[in-house]
Image: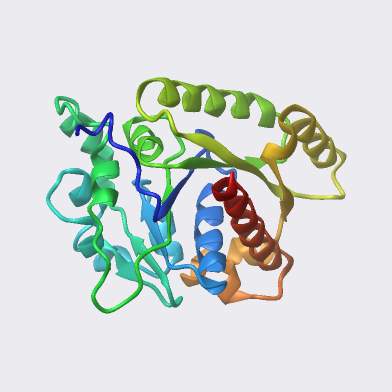
């Protein structure tokens, strides 16, 4: 069975966190959602596909600690499970990235399976002999719709879209929805939009409130009920190599990500029941 026709395994559930626009809270969402899912009992692997490597740094994996990375995975040199590093959070691991990913698109350009390299790597993960098998894989995508993002979508059951509460939010959303439709048509028919999470919300800002109303009007129940507020503690946490939930569990941002994790689990149960 070739990669194009292969079905994704039921477990782990693979969600990619994607938005072609930078600065929308994509990596922050991947880190803190992964931490929150681990905190409520899931075993989570974050796959850092962004050459900037902010998810890796934000979970305390310094650049000098990344002997192997997702670049090696995509090039077929290392299995994903051997690249994954444990973090300070129980049940949460990360496959770190390096700047080598900047050249991976050119290096894979002539490969017939170039869009399915990550799917293959995830499908080949074995249950670790000294721990629990992953129940969730979260893929942190770069802020562009390139081959790395295509690999993430081709490997995922669903896409989680962080959307900043700002003026051009709906325009950016339209672009990512178009990309998902193209991937559905050509690479991954089972791909869906898991949900849209509104980030950096400031209730004192009338524009933020208007964006929430507009997105909910256009996307209905695809928008999560949980809204991530603009929060200083969330912004500070990465500089300490920690997710916000470890840096300050009681802050509004951390509590919001815990609620989002619960909402995602609830939505997952509904999808499986259907």
Q: Nearer the viewer, residue 242 or 18?
A: 18
Quarter assignment of residue 61: bottom left
Q: How many marks?
A: 0
| Residue with the most extreme front position | 273
| Residue with the most extreme left position | 77
State whether residue 162 appears in this view: no
On the rendered structure, is 71 left or right of 40? left
Q: Quadrant of the C terminus?
A: top right
On the rendered structure, is 187 left or right of 103? right
Quarter assignment of residue 80: bottom left
On the rendered structure, is 129 left or right of 35? left
x%, y% of residue 128?
A: 26, 71
* Point 56% across, 54% down: residue: 29
Q: How is the model colour-coded?
A: rainbow
Residue 34 vs 41, above or below: the answer is above
Residue 201 vs 2, above or below: the answer is below
Quarter assignment of residue 101: top left
Q: Quadrant of the N terminus?
A: top left
Q: Nearer the viewer, residue 99 or 59?
A: 59
* Point 24% across, 40% down: residue: 117
* Point 42% across, 43% down: residue: 141
State whether residue 169 appears in this view: yes
x%, y% of residue 254?
A: 66, 67
* Point 65% across, 62% down: residue: 262
x%, y% of residue 250?
A: 71, 75
């Amino acid at each position: 069975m070739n990669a194009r026709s292969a079905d994704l395994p039921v477990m782990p559930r693979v969600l990619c966190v994607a938005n072609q626009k930078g600065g929308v809270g994509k990596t922050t969402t991947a880190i803190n959602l992964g931490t929150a899912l681990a905190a409520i009992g899931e075993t989570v692997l974050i796959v850092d596909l962004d050459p900037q490597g902010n998810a890796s740094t934000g979970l305390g994996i310094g650049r000098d600690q990344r002997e192997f990375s997702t670049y090696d995975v995509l090039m077929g040199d290392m299995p994903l499970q051997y690249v994954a590093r444990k973090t300070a959070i129980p049940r949460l691991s990360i496959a770190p990235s390096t700047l080598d990913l900047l050249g991976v698109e050119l290096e894979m350009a002539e490969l017939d399976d170039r869009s399915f390299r990550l799917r293959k790597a995830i499908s080949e993960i074995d249950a670790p002999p000294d721990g629990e098998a992953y129940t969730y894989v979260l893929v942190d995508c770069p802020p562009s719709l390139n081959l790395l993002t295509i690999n993430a979508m081709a490997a995922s059951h669903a896409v989680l879209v962080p959307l900043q509460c700002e003026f051009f939010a709906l325009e950016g959303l339209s672009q990512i929805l178009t990309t998902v439709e193209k991937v559905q048509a050509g690479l991954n028919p089972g791909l869906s939009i898991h949900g849209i999470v509104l980030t950096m919300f400031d209730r004192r800002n009338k524009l933020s409130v208007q964006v929430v109303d507009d997105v909910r009007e256009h996307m209905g129940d695809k928008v999560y009920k949980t809204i991530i507020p603009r929060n200083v503690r969330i912004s500070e946490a990465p500089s300490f190599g920690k997710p916000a939930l470890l840096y300050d569990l009681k802050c509004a941002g951390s509590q919001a990500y815990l609620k989002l994790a619960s909402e995602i689990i609830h939505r997952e149960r509904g999808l499986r029941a259907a």
